[in-house]
Image (cartoon, rainbow, N blue to C red):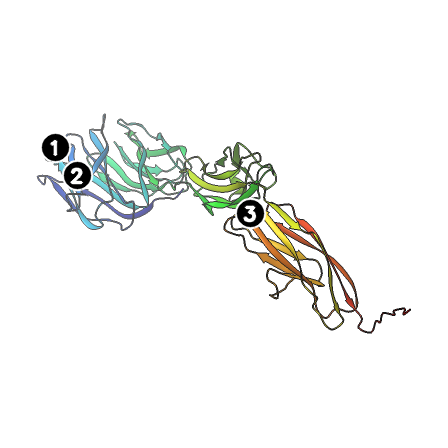
Amino acid sequence: MAQPTQGNVLTLSATPNNSNPYTITGMQQSVGSNGLLVVMVTMRNTVGITSMTFGSNPANNTCNIQYAYNRSGLQQRMEVWYIENADTGSQNLVITFNNNQYNPCSFHMRSYTDCGGIGNVIANNGGSGTPKTNVLNLQQDDSHIMMTSCGVNQILTQQIPQGTNKTFTSHNTYKQVATGAYGTASYLAGNINIRGTATSGNLTVDAVEILGIVATPTITSSPNPVSGMVTFVGAGVSNIVTFVVGLTNSTGNDVLIASSNYFEFSNDGITFVAGILTIPNASLPKTVSVRLKSGLNYGSYYLGNNITSVGASTVSQITSGTVYDVPTTGISPSFRNGMTYVLGNGPSNETTSTLTATDIVPNEDLYINVAGTDFEVSLTSGGTFTQNLTIPRPISGTLNTTLYIRLDQNLPVGNYSTTATFETLGASPKNFVFQGSVTDPSTRRIFNVT
């Protein structure tokens, strides 16, 4: 909770007499956002204030009355006025009374920025014997407190809270006034005792709570949206993607994520929740895992999942994923041999197999991975051969192409055999076997002649 920022202060005692309206010069509203100017007036109760303005801008110079009370038995009147976001700089405060005020008045003014306005007040309309203690119920932590008292005799102390003396200015309005006492400690919301003492006799205790800016909790979620969750019909849950949830200006509340019929969430990437996922406040910011549920039909899934916390605006975390039909792949034939060459004359002759695939996932390629380095493959005869071949996905999602296979060059004499794998996302890998040989040119065949 942020405290208000106190600005300029002006305290004076004056007798308006025939000056009605009465003008006070020299008060300044501090520069900054969320401004507030508060005016406390104590005066004889035969006259009251009907209006008050601050500044020359008629669109934004009218003050508002917070409260006004006559003080029974003291023949005094206490009024509190305020204006929000007034013109900054030195301005005239113009006070209009309901009749000419020929008695001394006590004026105390304070300006603020970063202010949330006026909170609770103590507006005691009567006095009682010293010491006088009233209870101010603070709306929020870290508020500031303005205080004033009026009594029959000399006022000795102004205490915010009870037991802590604050400095003040004494005025005589035909009664004794203490004004300007001010509390700025890190008070907690709730009841606080405000006390005034005098040499003797009755006195009053008034107080005004000045609020700070209540920083609104804000949920953050990044990245948003998240996508890339993929699974297949009958294959169970999808892969996991993650995003980070945070809460700025936290008031200590947990964050909740409401899952849906399609997606489920987890705090640890292991245990997934199908209902409401609770993220403890102490763990924020938190990396959250999300995946598509199992048992979904073919199709694309896109949803906004509500993230909530007390006092914060709801954030919709967009999640998207897709359930595909299971791709099928094939190799024919799956066994290829006869690749051979005489030592030093490689590579071998080429042989072929046919590769087929259906329901290939969009944006997913197909792959041939040959074990070892003895054999190599290509999609074109006489083209570039490699042990790891990427086959771009056809636009149609269906593949029917020829694979060229050969025994690599520069191999020593011997027989060679290896396996290769044909795969794409979602399909069961298909394996096939290659065999070939390198022969010794010095080997001779002996024929029997008859």
Three-letter amino acid code at the position of disc 2: Met
Q: Which mark is residue 52?
A: 2
Q: Position of residue 276 (x, y in %)?
A: 51, 32
Determine whether, in the image, residue 103 is placed left or right of residue 366: left
- Which residue is pictured at 18% across the width and 30% down the height? 45
Query: Between 400 and 180, which is closer to the camera in this rendering?
Result: 400
Q: Is mark 1 on a helix, strand or loop?
A: loop
Three-letter amino acid code at the position of disc 1: Asn
Which mark is nearer the camera, 1 or 3? 3
Sequence-earlier tag: 1 or 2: 2
Q: How crowded is mark 2: few (under 14 residues within 10 Å), some or many (20 or more)?
A: many
Q: What element carries label 2?
A: strand
- Which residue is pictured at 80% across the width and 71% down the height? 440
Up/down of 347 relative to 82, above or below: below
Which mark is nearer the camera, 1 or 2? 2
Up/down of 71 relative to 169, above or below: above
* Residue to which mark 1 is pinned: 98
Quarter holding the N terminus is top left
